[in-house]
Structure formats: structure tokens, C-alpha cells
Amino acid sequence: MYYLCEIEDDNDIIKIALPKGKIIGISDKVVKSTKTCDFALHKNKLYPILTHADLKNPKFKFFLIFKDFAFGITRLIKETKNTPIEIIKNELYTGLIKDKEEYFIYNIEKLKPAQKVRYLDKNDNNEFDEEKFNYVVVDKKYAIAINNISTILLSKEIVKYPTEKFIGFVDYKKIIPVKQIKEGKYVIITNDIAYQCGDIQTANGKVLEGEDEKVLESNIGKFPILE
């Protein structure tokens, strides 16, 4: 089964289909970042917002939540059991579904962070209120400011090269060393260092400054801040 979706992009409407079986939820909550990409909030976890690789100025109202990312769309039309027509040797599309209109099955291996996005409320006329979360808590041990996060990758992107302080590195616009908090499936990328972890939660609170470290006193506990 597939979800039939639309994405408004400038004066164009892109009609795509996405596999329902790989979608674990839907969200309309966005957490904005000053870095590479924004995040969708779903069940107290942040998912980097990715989308169609060929958009210029998309308008998002909803986010379809996959295991490791959120896919931004303007509207969800319906679900369908229609059998797709296979498309041969196309990078962006793997098939075509004919309903009342034609929807191309998007290849979710070909995604990019959403840029120049307009976020809309449910009435299509106002921006979302930003969620009041300013930190993520990593493996219930440390806090990282959301504005310091460039993106979140999967651990398979780590190139293993153990040293005294690091387990390896990732190649994200430059070579960034990776520290391991926990042997988990995520890598949080900041400007100069990355952190491998298994659990990411959102939090808000105030920063307490000590002699040697800063601590986030949040709604879910106190955590040293990684900077």
C-alpha cells in the first residue's frame, strides 16, 4: 500500500507516492535549527526533515515519519492499494500509480535536507509555532543545544578508526571525529565533533554554569552540556 501525497513547490505541485509499510507515524510539529536542517517531533524524538531532492521552495504542513528521518509534504491525499507500474533506471522514481491522477513512487534513497521551507499551520495561512525545545538529551546522559546540531546521521556512516578519544570519523562536508556515548544507531553531527548514541529525546530548561561545565536543568532531569 502507498500514501498518495502532494508537495507545493513555488507554483508547481509535485504528486508522489510513499510506501505505507515503512512509515511509523505522522507529525505536524517542527523544531527549527540554525544549522543544516530542521527536525520533526514525534513521540518525544527528533527526526531530521528530508524531502524530494529536486525542490526549490517547498511548503510543508505534515511530516511522514520513517525509521530514521521525516519526509516533508504539503498534504496527504489518500492511501491506495493500486498496483504500481515499474519505472526502469530512474534515480528519483521507481514506479507510477494511477488513481484519479498520476503519482510517482519516490525513491526514498534519494533524499536531501529540506531548504528554504515554508512551514504552514493547519489552515494554510500561518507558520507553525516553534516547539519550545532547545536541547536534545542523548542516551539520558548529556544535553546538546539543538542550534548546535547540523544533522543526524545513521551509525553506518562512521568510518572506524579508533584513537584514544574517538572511535572513528564521518565525512559530512568535512572530516569530523566521532565520540561514542553509546553503541547506538545514530550519529549527532555538530560543527567540530560527532557523537554516536542510541536514544535522543527533546528537552527544555535553564543552563546552570559551574567552574568546569555547564548543566541543563530540564523538564526531564539534569544533564551536563556537550559543546
Image: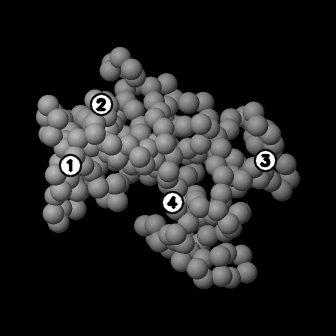
Quadrant for residue 45, please give it. Answer: top right
Whole-number angstrom distance, CA of label 2 to CA of label 3: 43 Å
Q: Tell me the residue that label 1 is attached to.
A: 84
Residue at the spot 44% in from the left edge and 26% down from the top edge: 128
79 left or right of 159 in image = left
Q: Nearer the viewer, mark 1 or mark 3?
A: 1
Which of pointers 1 and 3 lies earlier in the amino acid sequence? 1
Q: Nearer the viewer, mark 2 or mark 4?
A: 2
154 left or right of 70 in image = right
Which of pointers 2 and 3 lies earlier in the amino acid sequence? 2
Q: Residue type at mark 2: give it.
A: Lys
Query: SS class of the residue under badge 1?
Result: loop
Q: Tell me the residue that label 2 is attached to.
A: 78
Give the position of the C terminus as an image quadrant.
bottom right
Image location (x, y in percent) of residue 160? 58, 79
Q: Badges 3 and 4: C-beta atoms under 8 Å apart? A: no
Q: Residue type at mark 3: give it.
A: Phe
Q: Are there few (<14), some (14-19), or many (20+) residues within 10 Å of tag 3?
A: some
Q: Are there few (<14), some (14-19), or many (20+) residues within 10 Å of tag 1?
A: some
Q: Badges 1 and 3: C-beta atoms under 8 Å apart? A: no
Image location (x, y in percent) of residue 44? 62, 38
Q: Tell me the residue that label 3 is attached to.
A: 223
Whole-number angstrom distance, CA of label 1 to CA of label 4: 31 Å
